[in-house]
Image (cartoon, rainbow, N blue to C red):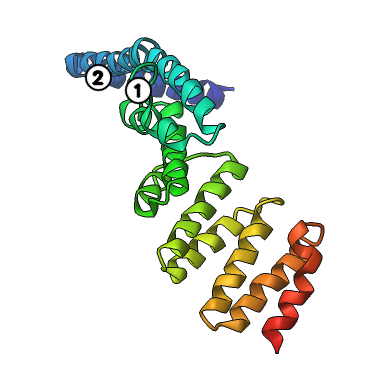
Amino acid sequence: MAKKAEQKHDELENVENVLSASEAFIEKYQKQLLIGVGTIVLVVLLALSFRNFYLQPRENDAENEMYKAQSYFERDSFKVALDGDGVNFIGFKEIASEYSLTSSGNLAAAYTGICYYKLGQYQDAIKYLSQYDGDDTYFTTTVIGLTGDCYVDLGETSKAISYYEKAADMNNMVMSPVYLKKAGIAYESLKQPADAEKMYTEIKEKYPKSSEASDIDKYIARVQQ
């Protein structure tokens, strides 16, 4: 009993020592601690203010501009969608620049790249397509694959293949077989039948229900000759 009481007394004494040390530390560094806490609070308040009073209103403005540009894009008026009409809206290119911190600005970069591709300006298309950073698998796969198309049109087939394979690696059930097939055709153009066969075989084995798989045996037979 006496031993337990002694242990309890020692434990209480240790706790008191720790508390005393903590109080001494706080008293010694009170100013620095208050500055640190104040800095954290200030950073949080600034972040909230930036989001609520700057970023969100700009997001709303960007969405309005995007809606107007997309209406022209859907009518295949790519030049107007890209540059705006000079009166009612500014176009994808300026949205991507002016609202770059917003999700709409990010999306506008992709649309800018697509417009440039449609207009045959492939270097500019690559520049803007590469700026897009999205988490939508379908659209991201398409953007990466379209970058490959740009390189094909520029005669840089090896670079195109790297983008086709990257797009295929997104494992999108609809778009991945499309870019596997494009990669296979590109490999054939470079006289690399073994690599082409690998692409075509992946379509057959991994995406057997895709439209690209419907005639893939023909492509496999062609590169095996």
Q: Residue 171 versus residue 151: which sits nearer the camera?
A: 151
Quadrant (top left/top right/bottom left/bottom right) for the N terminus: top right
From the top left corner, tell me how far across and down residue 11 is, in percent: 45, 24
Identify the residue at the far bottom of this view.
225
Q: Is residue 124 left or right of residue 26?
A: right
Say if 208 sits above or below 82 in the image. below
Say if 43 sits above or below 186 in the image. above
From the top left corner, tell me how far across and down residue 101 is, in percent: 36, 28
Say if 43 sits above or below 162 in the image. above
Q: Quadrant of residue 13?
A: top left
Quadrant (top left/top right/bottom left/bottom right) for the C terminus: bottom right
Q: Is residue 127 left or right of residue 67?
A: left
| Number of the label disc, if any, that sits on residue 18 | 1
Which amino acid, mark 1? Val
Say if 75 sits above or below 30 in the image. below
Which amino acid, mark 2? Gly
| Number of the label disc, if any, that sits on residue 174 | none
Q: Is residue 21 left or right of residue 196?
A: left
Q: Residue 117 versus residue 168: which sits nearer the camera?
A: 117
- Binning the other alpha carbons within 10 Å of mark 2 as few (below 14), some (14 to 19) or many (20 upward) gives few
From the top left corner, tell me how far across and down residue 164 is, in percent: 54, 61
Q: Quadrant of residue 100?
A: top left
Q: Nearer the viewer, mark 1 or mark 2?
A: 2
Q: Residue at x 17, y 14 (%)?
A: 31
- Binning the other alpha carbons within 10 Å of mark 1 as few (below 14), some (14 to 19) or many (20 upward) gives few
What residue does disc 2 label? 36
From the top left corner, tell me how far across and down residue 25 is, in percent: 24, 20
Q: Secondary structure at mark 1?
A: helix
Q: Residue at x 29, y 18 (%)?
A: 43
Give the Cα distance between marks 1 and 2: 23 Å
Q: Secondary structure at mark 2?
A: helix
Q: Residue at x 56, y 63 (%)?
A: 165
